[in-house]
Amino acid sequence: MKTAIIGLGNIGARLARNFARGGSTMILADRTVAKAEALAADIGVKATAATVADAIGEADTLILSISFDAIRAFIPQHNERLTGKLLVDPSNPIVPDGKGAFRKVISAEQSAGETIAGRLPGGVRLVKAFGTLGAESLASGAFRSPDRAVLFYATDDRMAGETVAALISASGFDPVSVGGIDRSLRIEVGGDLHEFGKLGRLVSEAEARALI
C-alpha cells in the first residue's frame, strides 16, 4: 500500500520527516513539483516526489495536508479519481481573523471532518487524523520515550482506521481512536482533545484513554 502526502507546508513537511525517521516510504506532492523534489532530496531514499495528479494515481492513501477550503475544492476537482482511495483529513476550519488570532469558517457546532465526509463521492473512505498537534509538537513529540505521545483519529470505517493507526505509529506516535467522524469536533482546533483547545498539551496513551 502506498501513501502520499499532498501539501508540504509546516504540517505536511513535518509528517514527511517523521515518516522517514520511522522507516516509511512516502510519495510527496505539492502545487509545484520543485517543492516536492527539494523535500524528497533532503529526506533521502524514503521519499519520492510527484505531481498532485500522479500522487493521486499512484497512492492508496492520500494525506491531504492542505487547508480546509483547499480540501473542499480538491474533492470535486479530482472527484472521479478518488474512488477506492483512503483520504486522511488533518484540516481545521479556521482562517486568520486579521487581529492576530483565528476565526472559524463554519458554524461552531460543525466540524471539518463531517463537512468533508458529506462532500465525498461513493467509494471513498475518510479518516480524520494528524491535525491534533501543531508542527512544533509533531516534531518534539515524535518517537518520545518512554511514553509515546498520542495522535487522535476519528473514522466510521474500521479498516481505514486500522490503516491510519499504523501510519500514526510509524510516524512516532501512539494512535487513539475517539470514535466516528461525528466526533471530529473533539480533535479539531478548540476541541477538548486538541493541542490548541482545552487539552493544550501532549498526552500519553494512558492519559488519552482516560480523557475519552
Image: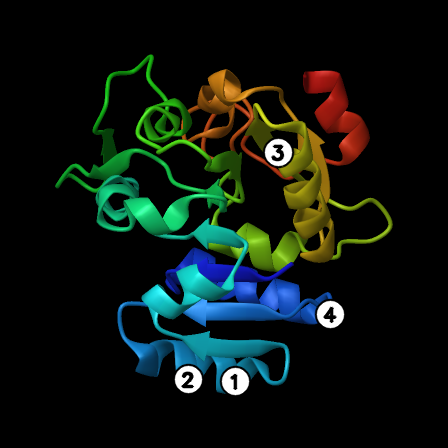
Q: Type of residue at label 4?
A: Gly
The secondary element bearing badge 3 is classed as strand
Q: How far separated are the C-alphas under marks 4 and 2?
A: 19 Å
Task: Give how far apart the Cα atoms at labels 2 and 1 are.
Answer: 6 Å
Q: Mark 3 points at which residue?
A: 152
Question: What residue lies at 50% left-to-right and 80% top-to-bottom?
Answer: 40
Name which of mark 4 and mark 2 comes first in the sequence.
Answer: 4
| Helix, strand or loop under label 1 | helix
* Label whose residue precedes the other's in the sequence (4 or 3): 4
- The image's mark for residue 42 is 1
**Image quadrant in which you'd find residue 1:** bottom right
Give residue 78's position: percent from left, percent from top.
28, 50
> Label 3 amino acid?
Phe
Crowd tier of the residue under label 1, counting other residues whose Cα lies within 10 Å: few below 14, some 14–19, many 20 or above: few
Above-or-below relation of 26 to 152: below
Q: For the residues carrying marks 1 and 4, which lies nearer the camera in this image? A: 4
Give the side of residue 116 with respect to residue 55, left or right: left
Picture layout, residue 58 above or below residue 125: below
Q: How crowded is mark 4: few (under 14 residues within 10 Å), some or many (20 or more)?
A: few
Q: Which residue is labeled 2 in the image?
A: 38
The vertical placement of 173 against 170, above or below, is: above
Q: Distance between the residues labelled 1 and 3?
A: 28 Å
Side (left or right) of 35 relative to 84: left
Cα separation between marks 4 and 3:
21 Å
Report the residue at 62% width, 37% height from top: 160
Circle 2: element type: helix
Q: In this figure, which residue is indicated by the disc labeled 4?
A: 23
Among numbered discs 1 and 4, the one appearing first in the sequence: 4
What amino acid type is highlighted by mark number 1? Asp
Q: In this view, does 132 lie to the left or right of 52?
A: right
